[in-house]
Image: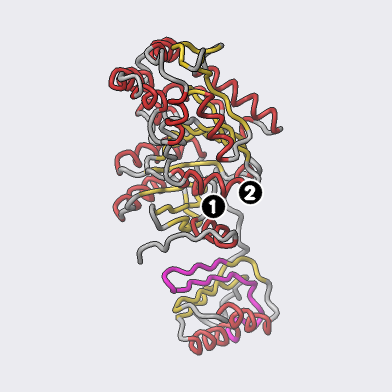
Amino acid sequence: MTDFEEPPKTLLITLTGKDRPGVTSAVFSTLATAGVEVVDIEQIVLRRRLVLGVLVSAPRDWKKLREAVQKVGADLGMQVEVDRGVGDNKSRRDGRSHVTVIGAPLRARAMAAMTGCIADAGANIDRIERMARYPVTAIELHVSGVETEKLRARLVKEAARQGIDVAVQPANLLRRGMRLIVMDVDSTLVQGEVIEMLAAHAGCEPEVARVTEQAMRGELDFESSLRSRVALLEGIPAEALDRVYEGIVFAPGARTMIRTLRRLGYRFAMVSGGFSQITDRIAKDLGFDFAHANELEIVDGKLTGRIVGDVVDRAGKAEALRRFAASVGVSEASVIAIGDGANDLDMLNAAGLGIAYNAKPMVQEAADTAVNVPYLDAIMYLLGISREEVEAADAEAGIITPAPPV
């Protein structure tokens, strides 16, 4: 470098070192004396190590500013690099996506495979941030340069090979707007199948469980299989519904997810191939806005083995989703649907974001994304909400979250 070189248009100043209060303030106080314009800035703290990058317009005496910044860094015990820039900071390329990677654990080889796949697709990683470190590790990458659908096709296959979850979504305003969450109930919102719990009272649980599994895999027509299973419940006292409800166990993280998203104005609906005598009570318990399910016929205090009205099947679930979206005044693109079985496929396809949660293979292949970790609140990371933000909001409300392992 010589004094006769053309002066730079911008300077990229990077500081790295132990984080402490006042670092950013000290740097900008020094920049202020040179009267420069801030073009871009990013800062991260990783395990108490700070990385601060600032792109500024270069003053006429840019070398004097470089020396001043280096002195500030030395006083703070930090490493400083000042690179000559050329031109302004250009906007990111088209084809911007949010890529969320979830693992339990998330191993380095999996991240190497995913980031390599992004590079092979011709895309660029503009930013990386951690969304959660416990009980799962969730990392979000801001990617540009390749259309979302093309990128998703590549990354979904690689994630399956690596045994991790990935969600690839377009970077648009939908993430920041009020949305409607439409959920399946059995084996999604709650653990297990309600009809099997009822069948235990009739002594036919194994037979019902076998047919349920076939129906969820899409091997049997849902309506006919449901009617045949319900017929086996004939004669069960209606009080059994109370005992089944009392034994309901929600998916881990379900209450956390619902509580957090309701704070943000999200609305909730459940659409179930199960029974309204159970789902209506769950909806009231969790504060859902809508619920739609089949109704068991009860005569003289006993189940008749029949269903009242039409069966809520694949098409019925999708229709309910559209009806609920219209009720709250949002487009189908603003709906997030969550389910696990073949009868959820139309609903997942109708939503702007369809999530297969611990789902059957055919459902995972058809959905926009799949979440296979056993924590329903991991879905929040797909929406750009971090574990730290959730815990901070809970703490303000007096809800104490157990500390994660160090």
| Coloring applied to the structure | secondary structure
Looking at the rendering, the stretch of residues picked out in magenta corresponds to: 42-64
Q: Residues within 10 Å of mark 2 (few under 14, many from 20)?
A: few
- Residue 225 image offset from top left, x and y in percent: 39, 13
| Residue at the image point whose x is 42% and y is 22% from the top | 342
Horizontally, residue 244 falls left or right of residue 300, namely: left
- Residue 212 image offset from top left, x and y in percent: 36, 20
Horizontally, residue 293 falls left or right of residue 137, namely: right
Q: Is residue 115 within the magenta segment?
A: no
| Residue at the image point whose x is 57% and y is 87% from the top | 68
Relative height, residue 46 to residue 272 (above, below): below
Q: Is residue 46 within the magenta segment?
A: yes
Amino acid under disc 1 = Ile
Q: Residues within 10 Å of mark 1 (few under 14, many from 20)?
A: some
**Residue with the mark numbered 2:** 264
Q: Secondary structure at mark 1?
A: loop
